[in-house]
Amino acid sequence: FFDVLCAVPFASLRQQNRPWLFLALKLGGIVLNIVFVLFFIEILPVLAEMSLFWKNILAWGDQLFFIFLGNLMASAIVFFVLITFVKKEDFNWDTSFLKRMLVFSWPLVIVAIAGVINQSSYITFQKYILPNDLQTNLSEGGVFAAAASLALLLNLFTIAFNYAAEPFFFAHRDRADARKVYADVALAFTIVGCVMMIVILGYIDLFQLLIGRNFRAGLEVVPLLLISYLLLGIYYNVSIWYKLADKTLWGAWIAGGGALITIVGNILLIKEMHVIGSAWAAVACYLFMVVLCYVLGQKLYPIPYKIWRMMGWIGIAIGLYFLMEWLRRFYEDNVAIILVVNTVIIGFYLFLVYVFEKGLVRQMMVKGSDSIT
């Protein structure tokens, strides 16, 4: 309930371009949640042995109850802090506006549900479709999830971009050059996403240290998941048209189609390819959504995306990754040499970006242009 009440004030902070306050409150809620849970689970039992007061509190419920209580307390505190930053408004009921909002937003509920299916359902599919007993299936799924956490580094960037991009897109919708700006943002995102992808893959020998040794057998899924998250970010760019044009029902159909591909893909591919089938299903899902959304958008709300340049940078990044893997065979036992070689290749990619996208790079890094913020 409190999280729902926070949704609009948080959206207001995004619209006001107040990212640091947004970040502080979001992270503050997480920290409070952790602190409360640690207190109830670790400290409260100790205090209960020393005082009847704390013992009576401990008797309220079991550990699961206190975990939920900590979550509730953190959400409530964030809400009451958040409303102090919201401008005072007269709460007048506007029926006509409510109708417009419901027409606009109900398809986005389907989009959100489809997003959960696309990003989280692999756990359930692996649990029941992998050919071993339940415990072994969960173990294999854990290896996949651990390796997938490395790809989440790119996904975090994608999520952060989406938080910032939507209010930016809406704020610029009435500018004469708005659609050109959207195209430049999509190209810039693609380039930055490709750089992050090739950096993670180039230094995978270092990034793998973030996960336990027993979980590193699943690293083969990382390149596929990185591509899928890159495609997801591009989808966030090319899907803005149905929100700007108030045609969100198209978004529901596109997201629903992607969810269907995720479900069918996992069912079919896990049987044949084990856990890596989930990664291929993710690539197929987001590729379908990007292509369909782009094609429909060019018909209903055309934006001059630099699609060939975007595809070119993705292709070059993938090609350089295969070059890294081919060269790795010659220095497989020497991680230092592998890192040096990969650093040179990453540097070459950055050099190409600077040479061929010099104007865009200057806008992003020097001018601070309003069109690429």
Image (spheres, rainbow, N blue to C red):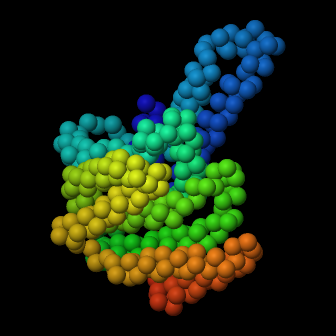
Q: Is residue 116 left or right of residue 293?
A: right
Name which residue lies at 48% across and 75% down. Answer: 318
Q: Depth check: 46 or 75 in front?
A: 46
**x, y percent for residue 322:** 53, 77
Residue furthest bottom in the image: 355
Residue 17: in sight, yes or no? no
Q: Depth check: 366 or 214 in front?
A: 214
Number of residue marks:
0
**x, y percent for residue 49:** 79, 13
Q: Is residue 90 left or right of residue 155?
A: left
Q: Is residue 68 left or right of residue 94?
A: right
Q: Depth check: 354 or 149 in front?
A: 149
Check the picture and name the quadrant holding the N terminus.
Answer: top left
**x, y percent for residue 213:** 70, 53
- Is 207 drawn above or below residue 43 in the view shown? below
Q: Depth check: 273 or 86 in front?
A: 273
The quarter holding residue 312 reads bottom left
Q: Is residue 336 left or right of residue 93?
A: right
Name which residue lies at 55% across and 26% down. Answer: 68
Name which residue lies at 51% across and 34% down. Answer: 134
Residue 102: in sight, yes or no? yes
- Is 110 drawn above or below residue 305 in the view shown? above
Residue furthest right in the image: 50
Name which residue lies at 48% across and 51% down. Answer: 275
